[in-house]
Image: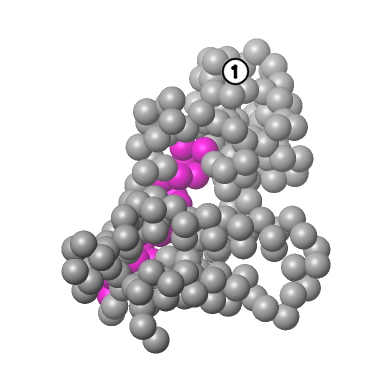
Amino acid sequence: MAGRQSYHHGNLREALVEAAVALIEQSGPQAFSLSEAARRAGVSPAAPYRHFKNRDDLLEEVARRGFIAFAECMNDAYDDGKPNPLRALSRVGNAYLDFASRNPGYYMAMFESNVAVVSNSELWETSERAFGVLVRAAEALSEPLPKEERPPARMVANHIWALSHGVVELFSRNRNFSRSPVSPEDMLASGVLIYLRGLNLVVH
């Protein structure tokens, strides 16, 4: 009923995105169909084609919106690297985990749906905004080192991103980890710290 009301008020696109997010949370990014999103939004199976070419088009829109919100979340957490790069990076890591926990539908669309991020320029740009926060953090951490000793910032950002995503997957997909005495935040923080020490980016 809510979806049908949204449609009559000219918000069919929004209703379909919301329906897709709910379906992804329920069944995963590969399981939902455009017709099922239409049914949940309270419109006919033909109605979604006014806004989306097909199911993948809708999925990409969900991912795009997810990356926009994700980038804002990461950037707010970084807060221009205050009071120091390591503390700021720690906040970014916690923000990553928090976003994944609070927005599973968007997160799965972004990272587990096989959407063509690289071939979609708009989607690539939005994903790069989030990744760029980690690149800035890596650059700030390596700044005290001589230029010839600084590791590539994008490499460091990629590795930290991979660690973050791995922690999300462990705790969201594995029941054993959901009962772990170690929190996701502590697991990520310790892994990142060990990694940074290996690169001489932190000394304590």
* Dominant secondary-structure state across the stretch colored magenta: helix
Magenta stretch encompasses residue 96: no
Residue 165 to residue 6: above or below? below
- Residue at (47, 60) in percent of width and height: 160
Image location of residue 179, percent across then percent down:
78, 73
Residue 193 to residue 131: above or below? below
Residue that carries the numbered disc 1 in the rendered image:
54
- Residue at (49, 44) in percent of width and height: 66
The answer to whether 132 appears left or right of 33 in the picture is left
Task: Please say whether residue 99 is visible from this viewpoint.
Answer: no
Q: Identify the image quadrant of the N terminus.
A: top right
As rendered, which of 156 and 69 lies closer to the eye?
Answer: 156
Q: Residue furthest right?
A: 176
As rendered, which of 150 and 94 lies closer to the eye?
Answer: 150
As rendered, which of 193 and 38 lies closer to the eye?
Answer: 193
- Residue at (54, 71) in percent of width and height: 191
Q: Residue furthest front?
A: 148
Q: Identify the image quadrant of the C terminus.
A: bottom left
The answer to whether 71 appears left or right of 166 in the picture is left
Residue 53 to residue 92: above or below? above
The answer to whether 76 appears left or right of 183 in the picture is left
Image location of residue 162, percent across then percent down:
53, 55
Magenta stretch encompasses residue 77: yes
In the image, which residues are magenta?
63-82
Q: Give the class, few, some or many, for how many residues have Cα within 10 Å of label 1's Cα (few <14, many ≥20).
A: few
Image location of residue 32, percent across then percent down:
72, 30
Where on the picture, by quarter, is residue 6?
top right
Image location of residue 164, percent across then percent down:
54, 60
